Image: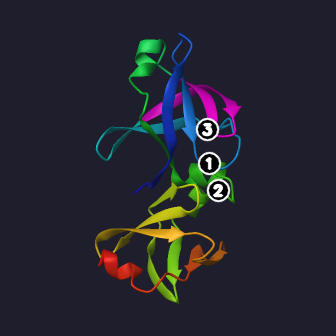
Amino acid sequence: MTNYCSIGKFVATFGVGGELILRHELGKRTALKGLEVLYLEDKKEELLPYFIEAARSKADQELYIKLEGIDTKEAAQKLVQRQVWLVEEAFHQYAGKSAPISLLGYHIIDNGEDIGEILEVIEQPHQVLCRIDLDGKEALIPVHQDTLQKIDNSKKQVLVQLPDGLLDVFR
């Protein structure tokens, strides 16, 4: 089974030829050079492939992208606000190593106990929230200077020391 990672979403159209602006969380300026396909959610949990005709960097977190078959502003407008996904291998190729989104797939270890795999990373001004599945329930784990002890890239682990009782809220 193929795993996919969300990198951001289309935020606007550009021009009249069907170009879109993609706001991404890859943690570095990129034009996705060499990437041929990305995926958009058509229905809940159903991703459709879209082939990239051209892409160029706009800013650190934005790029212009032209998709095959999307040739008008009206066609592009239908894709605005849609989440953009990459296959996991491509995601790791384009994500910056220090970007919070690169923690997807890592496991959170609280005082030696593996509490779950990071399924989503939500960036906020003073902290990062990592969504995990804790005993069948969704839990948001804060990762900031007070809770983070170490990130072990070789073991794909985020070592934290969470406040007493935090996990009880989700159980």
Which quadrant is the N terminus positioned in? bottom left
Residue at figure coordinates x 65%, y 38% from the top left: 32
Determine whether, in the image, residue 20 is placed left or right of residue 42. right
| Residue 51 badge | none
- What is the C-alpha distance between the residues marked 1 and 3? 14 Å
Q: Which residue is mark 1?
A: 26
Return the disc, 3 or 2, that comes first in the chain's sequence.
Answer: 3
| SS label for mark 2 | loop
Say which residue appears at 50% left-offset and 58% top-offset: 121
| Residue nearer the viewer, 3 or 118 | 118
The image quarter containing residue 81 is top left
The amino acid pointed to by label 2 is: Ala
N-terminal of the pair, mark 1 or mark 3, is: 1
- Range covered by the magenta-colored residues: 49-67
Give the x, y percent position of residue 41.
37, 39
Instruction: Kindly identify which residue carries mark 3.
Output: 35
Q: Which callout, 1 or 2, points at the residue further toward the start of the chain?
A: 1
**Total numbered labels placed on residues in the image:** 3
Nearer-the-camera pick, 55 or 35: 55
Q: Position of residue 171 (x, y in %)?
A: 29, 79
Between residue 67 and residue 170, name the one nearer to us. Answer: 170
